[in-house]
Amino acid sequence: MDDPRYKTLAYYERLVLQIKREVVQGVRVPGDKLPSVRDMAKAVQLNPNTVAKAYKQLEAQGVIEVQPGRGTFIGAQTAATAEEKQRVRPAFEAAVVSAKAAGVTLNELQAWLNAQFEEGQA
Amino acid sequence: MDDPRYKTLAYYERLVLQIKREVVQGVRVPGDKLPSVRDMAKAVQLNPNTVAKAYKQLEAQGVIEVQPGRGTFIGAQTAATAEEKQRVRPAFEAAVVSAKAAGVTLNELQAWLNAQFEEGQA
DNA sequence: TACGTGTACTATTATACATAGTACACTGAA
DNA sequence: TTCAGTGTACTATGTATAATAGTACACGTA
């Protein structure tokens, strides 16, 4: 969250992705408390409303849980429901199509995919 | 290109993805001539400028080739350069992270990935 | 009570998207 | 040369989203 524009993702989208990465990599584990909207806003140099927007989206996707009056916490990593798969799959397939159109091979994509999951084991 | 908003992708982005799909699936092969900006605009019910924006992006990514005064053609599918990999990989990894955070397993993502490449063989 | 929490609301500014219309430079064929 | 077709460039307008600022509310805990 430093430069004027990242050209691809909005601020709140970048924050959403960053928190997802930390959860996936085990940096944040279920039950961990996230900084408050105001504290996170100071930490990442954003407006509290922008952070709230990111939190709201993460909650809608089941990544975090909001306990009114207490704060927000990392949710338990449950298996994906059919609805969640239906939400995530188009974006995944679009990324695959773009990569394939650019000339990336299946073997290479498999390597990228496995690398992402090996990170989580560490 | 039918409804008011697809909620995720802009019109020109959807057109870019659609043409990539057709190239990846073999519906359009290298050397094929794409409809002109004006004809495609009529076909997909969009403004010629919006189609031109999609064509421009496809050309920048090496998917199509513009021959001034003649038209646009599907380019030869070459191996991905280091720059192209660097452009495509972040989007792929972001999709993987979101899927993993939603609870999608590695096996399932591998299946989705393989399915996309099996389509191209048909 | 007092405090911290997420949330809701209005308002403003800036950017991107999509449209419309016009014009230009280029190529190939009549 | 002339003409049609091509991609491209430009200005302009209306809309939608993003990000900001500021204020206020309902909730749960110490």
Image (cartoon, coloured by chain):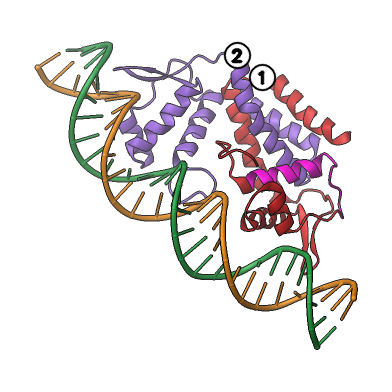
Chain colours: A purple, B red, C orange, D green
Relative side of C11 to B45, left or right: left
The kind of residue on which mark 2 rests is Ala
Q: Which residue appears at 82% of the width and 54% of the height? A: B75
Vertical side of A71 occupied by A7: above or below: below
Residue at 60% across / 38% down in the picture?
A: B3
Q: Secondary structure at mark 1?
A: loop
In the rendered structure, the residue with mark 2 lies on which chain? Answer: A
Callout 1, which amino acid? Thr
How would you classify the magenta stretch by its main secondary structure? helix
- Does the segment drawn in magenta span residue B27? yes
Judge the density around disc 1: few (<14), some (14-19), many (≥20) Cα neighbours within 10 Å.
some
**Residue at mark 2:** A79
- The picture places residue B77, in percent across and down from the top left corner, at 83, 49
Say whether residue C19 is left or right of residue B110.
Answer: left
**Which corner quadrant of the image does residue C14 belong to?**
bottom left
Which quarter of the rendering shows the N terminus of chain A?
top left
Residues packed near mark 2 inside 10 Å, few (<14), some (14 to 19) or many (20 plus): some
A87 shown above or below A43:
above
* Label 2 secondary element: loop
Looking at the picture, does residue B39 appear above or below residue A118? below
Residue B105 numbered tag = 1
Asked if labels 2 and 1 touch by Cβ distance under 8 angstroms, the answer is yes
**Range shown magenta:** B13-31
In-front residue for pair A30/B114? B114
The chain carrying label 1 is B
Residue A112 seen in this snapshot: yes
Q: Residue at x 58, y 44 (%)?
A: B10
> How far separated are the C-alphas under marks 1 and 2?
8 Å
Q: Quick check: A88 above or below A94?
A: above
